[in-house]
Amino acid sequence: MTTLLITGGAGFIGSHLTRLFVTKYPEYHIVNLDELTYAGNLENLQDIENAPNYTFVKGNIIDAALLQQLFNKYAFTAVLHCAAESHVDRSITDPLAFVKTNVLGTATLLQTAKDNWKNDFTGKIFYHISTDEVYGSLGDTGFFYENTAYDPRSPYSASKASSDHFVRAFYHTYGLPVKISNCSNNYGPFHFPEKLIPLCIHNIINNKPLPIYGKGENVRDWLFVEDHARAIDIIFHKGKTGETYNIGGHNEWTNIALVKELCKQMDIKLRREPGDSAKLITYVTDRAGHDLRYAIDATKLKEELGWVPSLQFEEGIAKTIDWYLENSEWLRDVTSGAYKEYYEGLYK
Ligand code: NAD
Ligand code: DAU
């Protein structure tokens, strides 16, 4: 049996990816290594936790001894590396946490894979899941391509850029068979409510202010999370070794237009008067170093591997809102305890 290591499988994207692989490939054994930080939650995987081809291990990717034990026990032939500190605002208050997990953690994982595969790389894959933020910030026009020069501007994106560089360095120096994808902003179920869309859904439900940084004119390119997982599946199985693939939704929204759209849809779902939720919109101090615009050109992925997003935004966002309304217990659980402290500290 092929045994794959997924890191960070209890997080937002990792849980969708783990579910996809566990259900679609019963012939693979999936081991999910996750430290269960504030962002990791085993509730995200309840529906597959007893699957015969799935094992969960709690642990940290910077723990080289643990990684070695797991390679000894499971003889992984592939790594799908999702674990990361992922929130830009947290990286502004605690950059070193991002260096530890995203840089040191990725390097530790690369080194362990290389040592265990002992230069016999046939049939092996180290797949690194990365972000479009490594390319920096766009003006009003243009797109990020796979060959766009790196220009990270936040501690988060600098740590992800660094991890991408290590992955490529292991490919060029040791021949480690790597694949990298850089994706735009994801949205969908199980998204932790520190990020814009789930935070606003949570606050609309609870009649709390919707904090818009600056003037709300920054632009993001939103992709439904299951489409990201599907793209990773295709690149993992059919993408070329040593290559990078951009993944994006061709779905750009200014933050303020996006939040107004959410308010409109939630007024209908919550049977409120039109315009009621939008009254919660509150402009707050801008994020330090706030990137203006991200937009991905995913032509390579479409032309080489035939991937296009399957969901239109209207459908994806409606599904997402319904999921949050139907899973109030999940939302309550993740917003209790430490979340409150974080939230009150950030939006003083
Ligand atoms: P997330 O914060 O929701 O989940 C991260 C997961 O990693 C959590 O389960 C957490 O417990 C785990 N983790 C964190 N540090 C760890 C460590 N040291 N050891 C083991 N596990 C650890 O993140 P996400 O939004 O699902 O992002 C997943 C990956 O995709 C990241 O690499 C991120 O950079 C990338 N990405 C995210 C987006 C997005 O819009 N969310 C877009 C493009 C790329
Ligand atoms: O582009 C991919 C990246 O998208 C991923 O690599 C990151 O892991 C992910 O967190 C996301 O980063 P962003 O910073 O774009 O996402 P976030 O949801 O934090 O913010 C989206 C936009 O909304 C951004 O312009 C900042 C703004 N914003 C965010 C929050 C949390 C607000 O205006 N108010 C808020 O309260």
Image: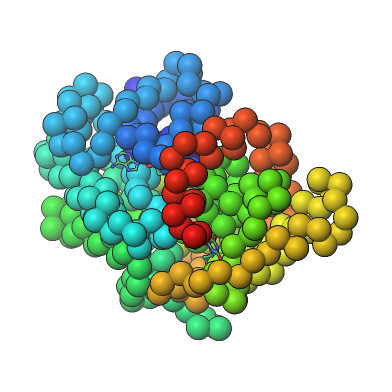
Horizontal relation, residue 17 to residue 180: left or right = right
Q: Where is residue 179 shown, x and y percent of the image?
A: 33, 53
Q: Nearer the viewer, residue 193 or 43?
A: 193
Does residue 136 sit above or below 128 in this rendering? below
Q: Percent position (x, y) of residue 147? A: 36, 73
Name the residue furthest bottom: 140
Residue at 29% from the left image edge and 45% from the top image edge: 126
Q: Residue at x 49, y 52 (%)?
A: 344
Instruction: Where is residue 121? Give x, y as percent.
Output: 20, 42
Q: How is the image coloured?
A: rainbow
Residue 10 place in picture, x, y as percent: 43, 35
Q: Which residue is at 26% across, 36% downward?
A: 60
Answer with left or right where residue 159 lies relative to residue 112.
Answer: right
> Looking at the image, how many numbered discs can be counted on the residues?
0
Confirm whether residue 292 shows in the render: yes
Toward the front, the furthest residue is 348
Determine whether 201 is above or below 91 in the image.
Answer: above
Residue 312 visible? The answer is no
Specify the quadrant that holds the N terminus.
top left
Q: Is residue 165 left or right of residue 247?
A: left
Residue 157 against residue 127 in the figure, above or below: below
Which residue appears at 49% of the width and 72% of the height?
A: 286
